[in-house]
Image (spheres, rainbow, N blue to C red):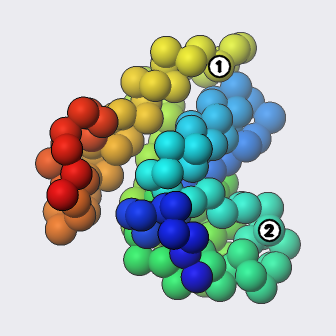
Amino acid sequence: MIDEEYETGFMVVSCSGGSGSGQAANSLAVELNKSGFAKMVCLAGIGAGLDECVEEAGKVRDLIVIDGCEKGCSQIMLRKMGIEPVHTFCLTKMGVECPVTEVDPAMLEELRKKIKLLFGQQRADSKYAVCGCDTCVRE
């Protein structure tokens, strides 16, 4: 069951790997969660096969997957649990250079907006389909 505070019904999982780009992916997912755009689901719980995590991620229509690098560990882990990622984002493909030594809040904000915009383009029937600017009024 999706919490009422997450009005979009979207969920997000992310890499939280040892590299800086993995840490940036995790920070980005946390920001999407804090803003109410998407509920964050525990990727480690999915990988561990915890029923509630696997079921929650498997039932949602729009699962946003954020990987830090091209290795795509988050996507691989989901596939191993029978969940096919649809909305995937790779931070290094979005311009984040490795190694990231420190997660810059301005970079996170720019990436958050990019992901919302790209997600909206991938999900044409979403109320976020056209804009990810955070200033447009939601209907």
- Could you tell me the amino acid type at mark 1? Val
User: Relative to 18, is 29 on the left or the right?
Assistant: left
From mark 1 to mark 2, how far is it between C-alphas?
24 Å
* Residue 139 locus on image (x, y percent): 18, 58
Residue 20: tell me if it is visible.
Answer: yes
The relative height of residue 35 versus residue 11 in the rendered view (above or below) is above
Where 115 falls versus 72 (above or below)?
A: above
Image-quadrant location for residue 42: bottom right
Q: Please give left or right for residue 125 compared with residue 78 in the image.
A: left
Label tally: 2
Numbered badge on residue 36: none
Where residue 138 sits: x, y (%)? 22, 51
Residue 25 in view of the camera: no
As helix, strand or loop, the secondary structure at mark 2 comes to helix
Q: x%, y% of residue 40?
A: 62, 57
* Mark 2 surroundings: few (<14), some (14-19) or many (≥20) residues within 10 A: few
Give the position of the N terminus as an image quadrant: bottom right
Vertical order, 54 against 23 (above or below): below
Relative vertical location of residue 100 with respect to residue 44 in this rendering, above or below:
above
Neighbor class of circle 1 (other Cα within 10 Å; few <14, some 14-19, many 20+) is some
Q: Earlier in the sequence, mark 1 or mark 2?
A: 2
Position of 34 with respect to 23 (left or right) is left
Dots 1, 2 in contact, CB < 8 A: no
What residue sits right under mark 1 in the picture?
103
Query: Which residue does the numbered mark 2 point to in the structure image?
Result: 45
